[in-house]
Image (tube, grey):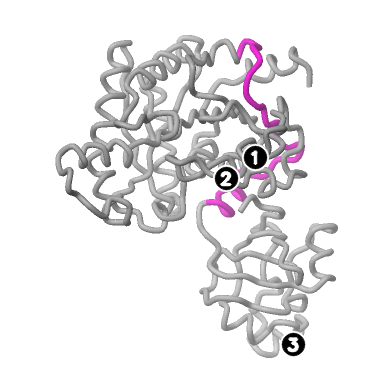
Amino acid sequence: MNSDQRRELLASARRVVIKVGSAVLTMEDGLDLNMLRHLAREINALRERGLDVLLVSSGAVAAGRRRIQFMRPDAAHLSDLPGRQAASAIGQGRLMHEYDRALAELGVVAAQVLLTREGLRIRERFLNARNTLNRLLDWGAVPIINENDTVSVKELQFGDNDTLASLAVGLVEADLFINLTSADGVYDKNPDQHPEAKRLDVIEDIGSLDIPAMCDGKTAVGSGGMYSKMRAARRVAQLGAPTLILSGRKGFSLGAVLDGAPGGTLVLPCEQCVSSKKFWLAYHDQPAGTIVVDDGAARALTELGKSLLPAGIVEVRGEFGQGALTAIRSKTDRVLGVGMCNYSSEQLQNIKGLRSSDIQEQYGEHAYEEAIHRDNMLLDPAI
C-alpha cells in the first residue's frame, strides 16, 4: 500500500473508536493531565472534521491507586481484586471529571458509559447500548467508555480495554479503530528483547501472522500489551475496518496521520468480512467448553464451509448447556472456530461419533442434525 492509498483509506472514515491505555494516560504519580488535555483537543479536531468519535479509556485503576496511596500511605493489598476494584471506584470519578473538564473547555459534552462483557452478551442489552451510543453521537456528545470494574470479576481479571474497544467498533459500526499505545507501532519481534526488530508500516493480512510469537510481552502499567492490541486489530479487520496502532506520546496529531503523515502501523481490513451477527456471537461471550473434532470434520469445516456434525466429534471438554458458545479444536489442539452448540455437553458425550439416523433414534425426529450449524459458527476466530 502506497501513501496515497493509505491517506485515502484513513480519510474515508466517518466514525472512529479511539482507545487510550494506562501506559499513555498515566505517570508515576497518577493521571497525566497534560496528556489528557492534548487527547481532548485531538478528539475535538476530529469532530470538527465531521467525524463521530467514541473514546475507550483506561486509567481508572491507576488514578485511584495513586489517590489511595495519598490518603492512606499504609494501605496494602492494592494489587488484589478487591483492592483494584476499590481503586477503580475512586479513580473512575477522577478520570471522568478530568475528561469532562477538558472537553467542556472546548465546548464538547462528555458522556460516561460503563460496560461489562456480561452486559453485551445479552442481545437485548447489546442493542440498548447501541441505541444509547448512537443517540449520544446524534446529540454531538463524546461517549467515554470503560469497563465497569467495580462490579466485574472475570473481566477485570482477564479482560482488557483493547478487547472492549474492538467490541465497541462492532457495537456502533465504526469504520476506523485508533489504538493509542506507548509503542510507536507494531514490530516484527518484541523490541524489548530483540533490538534489531523493525516496525511494520502496514499489515496487509493480519490473519496470516503468528501474533503470540510477535508479541511476547506486556507493558508495566497496562493489562494488555501488544498481544491484546493485535488480537483486537484482527477482530476489527474481520468487521471490515482498519486499525491504526499509534504512539500516544510526544504530542501526536491524529489529523496529520489521517492526512497521510507517516507513523504507527496500519492494519488493513480482511477481504472477506464476517457478519455483525457472527461477530457478536463469537466475541461477546467466552467459550463455555471445547469440542475436539477428527481430521475429516476439520477439513469439512475449514475447506468446505460445512456445519459440524456429531459424527465428527471425538472429545467434549467442560460442562455447558444447550445453546452455549463453544470452541472447536482439531486433534492437534488448533482452534478452528467457535459456535453456538445445539446440544449440551452431556448430550454431546452420548452422541459424539454417531450418524444422524442413530441420533434420531435416541432423541426423536426433532433432534438437531448439526452439533453446530455453520450459520452460528465463526471460523478462525481471534481468541
The residue indicated by pointer 2 is: 217
Q: Which quadrant would residue 144 be assigned to in this image? A: top left
What kind of residue is marked 3? Asp
Q: Residue at x 52, y 25 (%)?
A: 16
The residue indicated by pointer 3 is: 358
Mark 3 to mark 1: distance in Å?
A: 52 Å
> Earlier along the polypeptide chain: callout 2 or callout 3?
2
Q: Nearer the viewer, residue 337 or 36?
A: 36
> Earlier along the polypeptide chain: callout 2 or callout 1?
1
Q: Which residues are magenta?
A: 258-283
Quarter containing the N terminus: top right
The residue indicated by pointer 1 is: 190
The local secondary structure at tag 3 comes to helix
Q: Is residue 116 left or right of residue 315?
A: left
Asked if the residue at tag 1 contacts the one at tag 2, i.e. Cβ–Cβ closer than 8 Å, the answer is yes
As for residue 260 lying within the magenta part, the answer is yes
Q: Position of residue 362 (x, y in %)?
A: 66, 89
Q: Position of residue 63 (x, y in %)?
A: 29, 35
> Earlier along the polypeptide chain: callout 3 or callout 1?
1
Mark 2 to mark 1: distance in Å?
A: 7 Å
What kind of residue is marked 2? Gly
The image shows residue 255, relative to residue 76, as above or below, that is above
